[in-house]
Image (cartoon, helix red, strand yellow):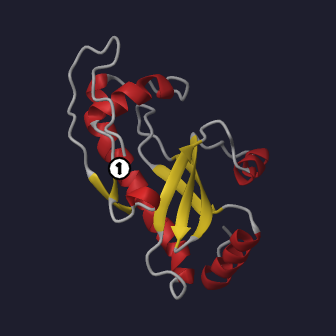
Amino acid sequence: MPPPNQQMAPGQKVPLSVDREVSSIPMAGKFDGKNWIYPSEQVNAARNIGFFSGKNWSPHERDMGVVVPIHNAVNEECWRRILDWEAMHETACKTPKLLRFEGKPRDYSPKARLWNLFGYRLPFDRHDWTVDRCGEKVKYVIDFYGGGEDPNGAPVSFFLDVRPAVSFGGVVDRLRMFWRTGRFQ
């Protein structure tokens, strides 16, 4: 994995930490045997200050010390939920690994669009994560929703909808999970 650009972004006024945290998420592919490494405060600031401007939130450089740990914790929770799904395939693969991920903030999933027709808010972000299940590539869809608000109107929680993408195997897994939990995913 090439090192990220840790330089200050144009217009940035405050230097930020360039320290990075190693995740618990194992990598697949050419970096097999290593774990994903989260971006630093500096990289997050350079990437995300413009990204969040269209999402009713305008982060500042000083926010990155809070944003980065939340970002990392949310990704760890996404991986934990993917492992819940992958547990159904434990006999075939004991060590699934994350091959790649892609952010698709404006590409709403069919499920999110359907719920929106019933009056629910659209997610503020979506990711597609591709897992290497011991040689089989399996795609997961993750919709990120904002939770409740504090008295000042700031979001204070997230809701994650993590599930296999629609495919033959994904639908079978969703039905198996429904049978186990009684909840439709």
Asked which quadrant contains residue 44, the reply is top left
Determine the secondary structure under disc 1. helix
Q: Is residue 53 above or below residue 26?
A: above
In front: 154, or 4? Answer: 4
Q: Residue at x 72, y 54 (%)?
A: 111
Give 143 or 35, whichever is nearer the viewer.
35
The residue identified by callout 1 is 72
Whether residue 123 sits left or right of residue 112 in the image: it is: left
Residue 177 visible in the shown view: yes
Q: Quadrant of residue 173?
A: bottom right
Residue 145, can we see it?
Answer: no
Residue shown at 25% from the left, 36% from the top:
65
Quarter of the image that includes the C terminus: bottom right
Q: Residue at x 79, y 46 (%)?
A: 117
Q: Nearer the viewer, residue 32 or 122?
A: 32
Q: Residue at x 34, y 38 (%)?
A: 67
Image coords of residue 68 (percent x, y): 32, 41
Q: Amino acid at mark 1?
A: Asn
Label count reads: 1
- 11 shown above or below 28: above
Residue that protrudes farthest toward the top in the picture: 11
Residue at the bottom extreme of this rendering: 91
Q: Residue 17 appears at what percent x and percent y? A: 20, 33
Mark 1: few/some/many CA within 10 Å (<14, 14-19, 20+): some
Q: Is residue 182 left or right of residue 57?
A: right
Where residue 6 appears, as percent x and y from the top left, is 28, 29
- In the depicted structure, whether residue 142 falls above or below residue 163: above
Residue 55 on image: x %, y %: 54, 29
